Structures are given as structure tokens and as C-alpha cells.
């Protein structure tokens, strides 16, 4: 029997994930550099840079939204595994699918709401930087869209593999220690 290739193993998705990781890492690096720059300005030169504070805020939103999507992709967001893992396997599957539907509805509402809100800030500029405010809110929309996409891929993959279950904390820790030993 031929096993289906995971959607995440496609060349496009591997490149996409590398770009996603690179943007997240670059955002964090820029935040650290700009924060250090501000500290030097404040404590050595007794001045400050307001534009860098505003840019740090923009980069924080971008990093947080991409981090949310990466967390969904890796199933690393918190849930009630310890409670649900005590249920019978069949009931676990039902709860898993119900949870998947609820999360998808929530993320869909977040996508819709952030898209609608994006339209209300058109034409507004940031306080210091001469950039549109919509840049920041587009990062929120992007993060919600990516999280919804990743969540949908996770649920579909779990259904296809017939692994609609929550992974217990003990099993997660065992997987992490196995991963760390392989490094």
C-alpha cells in the first residue's frame, strides 16, 4: 500500500517554512540590535530614538504572529492533554475532532475580524515612522491566516493517519528527550 506524502514535505512548503523561520529570526535579531542601540543611546549619550521604539513594536507584532503560526504547526500550544488522555481512545478522537472544529471556527473569526479591522485603519499613519498603521494589522491578519492553515493541515493529517488523539505530557517529554539525544 502506497503511503501518502505529507503536504508539509513538498518543496514549496519546505521553502515557505525556511522563509517563515528566517523572518522570525531576523525580526528577533533586529529587536535585540535596536534595543541595544536604545540602551547605548540612553545611558551613554543621554538621548533616545523614538523611531526605533516604534519599529521594535512593529517587529514584535510580526514575530509574535509568526510564532503563533509556528506553534500551531508544531502542535506546541497548550491544551488539556492530561485530562483528555484519560478518556477512552474513541472518545479522545471525538474530542480531538471537536477541538479541531472549535479552534478552526475561532481562527476563522479572527481572520475575518482582523481583515475587517484592517479596512478601518486605511490611511492612518504611525506616530513616529511615516508608515501606514495597516502594516501592523496586516501582520495580525497574516498570523491568523497562517495559524488557520497550519491547524487545518494538522487536523487533516491526523484524520488521514487515523491519529486523532492528544499526546500525553509524558509522551511529549519522551519524544523531546529522544529528539535531544539525536542532536
Image (tube, rainbow, N blue to C red):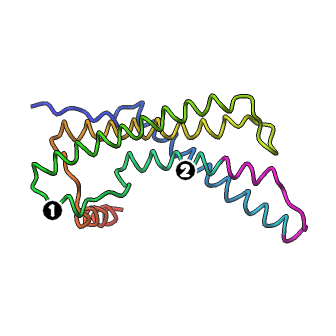
Is 115 magenta? The answer is no
For label 2, the residue is 64
Q: Residue at x 78, y 66 (%)?
A: 39
* Among the 4 quarters of the image, the one containing residue 106: top left
Is 51 magenta? The answer is yes
Above or below — where is 19 with respect to 77?
above
* Among the 4 quarters of the image, the one containing residue 88: bottom left
Point out which mark residue 60 bears.
none
Does dot 2 land on a helix, a strand or a loop? Answer: helix
Does dot 1 land on a helix, a strand or a loop? Answer: loop
Please state the horizontal and vertical placement of residue 12, each as a whole percent of the image: 42, 30
For the magenta stretch, what is the residue range?
Answer: 43-58
- Nearer the N terminus, badge 2 or badge 1? 2
Q: How many marks?
A: 2
Q: Residue at x 39, y 31 (%)?
A: 11
Please state the horizontal and vertical placement of residue 65, each as a whole percent of the image: 53, 46
The majority secondary structure of the magenta stretch comes to helix
For label 1, the residue is 86
Q: With 1 as the anchor, is 181 left or right in this view?
A: right
**The N terminus, quarter of image:** top left
Q: Which mark lies nearer to you, 2 or 1?
A: 1
**The C terminus, quarter of image:** bottom left
Alpha-carbon span between mark 2 and mark 1: 33 Å
Amino acid at each position: 500500500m502506497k503511503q501518502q506524502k505529507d503536504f508539509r514535505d513538498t518543496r514549496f512548503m519546505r521553502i515557505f517554512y525556511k522563509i517563515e523561520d528566517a523572518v522570525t529570526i531576523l525580526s528577533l535579531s533586529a529587536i535585540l540590535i535596536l534595543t541595544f542601540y536604545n540602551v547605548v543611546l540612553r545611558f551613554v549619550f543621554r538621548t533616545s530614538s523614538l523611531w526605533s521604539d516604534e519599529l521594535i513594536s512593529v517587529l514584535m507584532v510580526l514575530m509574535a504572529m509568526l510564532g503563533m503560526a509556528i506553534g500551531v504547526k508544531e502542535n506546541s500550544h497548550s491544551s488539556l492533554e492530561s485530562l483528555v488522555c484519560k478518556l477512552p481512545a474513541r472518545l479522545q478522537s471525538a474530542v480531538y475532532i471537536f477541538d479541531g472544529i472549535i479552534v478552526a471556527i475561532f481562527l476563522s473569526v479572527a481572520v475575518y475580524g482582523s481583515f475587517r479591522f484592517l479596512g478601518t485603519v486605511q490611511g492612518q499613519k504611525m506616530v513616529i515612522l511615516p508608515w501606514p498603521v495597516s502594516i501592523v494589522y496586516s501582520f495580525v491578519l497574516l498570523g491568523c491566516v497562517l495559524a488557520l492553515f497550519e491547524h487545518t493541515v494538522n487536523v487533516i493529517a491526523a484524520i488521514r493517519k487515523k491519529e486523532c488523539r492528544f499526546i500525553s505530557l509524558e509522551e511529549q517529554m519522551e519524544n523531546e528527550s529522544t529528539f535531544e539525544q539525536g542532536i
